[in-house]
Image: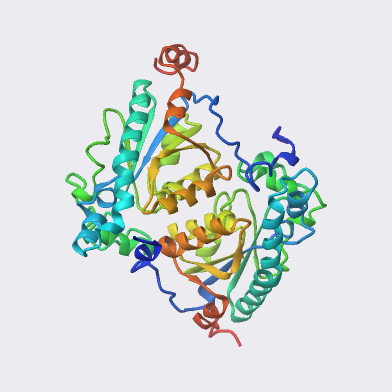
Amino acid sequence: MSDDPPVPNWYEHDGLRPIPPWNPDDQLDAVTTALVVIDVQYGNASPDHGIGKRMRDEGRSEVGHERFTRVATRVVPNVNRLAEAFRQRESLVVYLTINSLRHDFRDIPRNRRRLAGWRHGGTGMTDLSAPPKEHQILDDLGPRGDDVVLNKTTIGAFTSSNLPSVLRSAGIQTMVVSGVSTNSCIESTVRGAADMGFRVVIAEDACGAAMQAFHEEAIATMNGQFAAVAPTTEILAALSPIEQLHDSRAERGLHA
Amino acid sequence: MPNASDYLAGLGASLEGLPAAQVAVIVELPFGLVHPEGAVNRALLAEGAPERLAPAVSDFLEVVGARVVPQVRAFVEAVRERGGTVVIPTLGGPQIDTALLAPTVRSLARLLSTDAGMHAASVVAVEPDDVRITRTAVSAFTGTPLDMMLRSRSIDMVITAGVYTDGAVSSTARDAADFNYQSVVVADGCAGLDPVRHQASMRNHERLFGPVASVAQLLTTITADASRG
């Protein structure tokens, strides 16, 4: 049997909350922790493309205001702070994207086909060598250098990408999660990761949703049930100091 | 000011009619979570538990006892009569080794296992033709043969009902949509301890994954299997 804490503690964090809340003293091992950046693409994260352009063309730009403001003022700067720290430590950085690989969206689940049409201007990504602007990750954000980019065709990353294989191969035990949208692709991916046994830390101020209320409700749902929730600044402080990494990698037989 | 309905407009999926043979209902109603004497509810109300939980538990038990359990029981009976598939996932039991479960359900499984297996049982009685799943994680699909079993029966619509809306119901219904089933959540057949998170999960489902429909709506949508009777 496992050596988990005894039963009476399980309800302490507001009901059924098996995951310990974030503690600013927590440590994140840079060798076994990956940064995962979810779906920050022009199609859904820019006011000038995809969904944002559609809203503007329909004369209802104000509907996207909360989303695009959050992306510009919180998601992009905080993901960049995280990604820079992870790259400095040669830690794994994974960017996820979401898209169909067919003009007719036949390769993605039925519930996503209408939204996919809005995001990508009515077409999928049939030419992998020249993906449409709507598919591309925001230029301000990456990827850079050795960062891994994986496409998924579903809302959750564990149902349609090889993220699980990449994380396992790289010896990852903990995922720091960021991107958009908190209640959609982030929540499904976090649920999947936690059920697969990964420790998940959500960088709250590096995530965003269509509306701030959607974001906050999703954070409240995931916190303690599937993940710990932390601000970017505390995640950066918790990462292994760079000067310790050489010895740490050598001890584990990894290329230093 | 924009509101949630601006985002719902145009995205909600409509319910497509189907013969019952292509329909599966996943029933998330373990005794330990939905019965007033269930292990979870006793723990939530025990001496030493945070007092602020008591009103939420009381409201939850009221909704579950008066509406959720009777509605789901009636729905499950109708689906069986029409030739549909009923799936009953269970968690925990006297023989369970919690080390083999996902960390997301270990403590709950231990708690559900504390009363001779009783609390792991569903309040919807299992019939011989039902599909029984021993759950290993919050999603009924993760670590179980559920997807394969549904595919082998040519199931097209997966309907999820029970508790908690923002826990097992949402994880299972999200996965069902990702697996390209028509994923439906039962509007009057779900409940959660936190009404805000319950509503958020229902809204997320309708906006992103598939229809939220009442038992009455579903009964007009699911037709009896022509090969039966």
Left or right of A104: which side holds B166?
A: right
Q: What residue lies at 43% left-to-right and 26% top-to-bottom?
A: A236
Relative to A204, A143 lies left or right? left
**Visible in this render: residue A30?**
no
**Residue furthest out toward the front:** B1
B144 or A51, which is in the foreground? A51
Which quarter shows the C terminus of chain B? bottom right
**Outermost residue to the bottom:** B229
How far across and how far down the image is residue A110, in percent? Answer: 37, 64
Q: Is residue B228 above or below residue B33?
A: below
Which residue does the image show at 24% across and 36% down from the upper left? A140
Q: Position of residue A103 (x, y in %)?
A: 23, 60
Which image quarter is the N terminus of chain B in? bottom left
Q: Is residue B225 placed above or below B87 in the rendered structure?
A: below
- Does residue B104 appear anywhere in the picture? yes
Expressed as whole percent of the image width and height from the top left, the position of residue A134 reads 22, 50
Residue A119 lies in what quarter of the image? bottom left
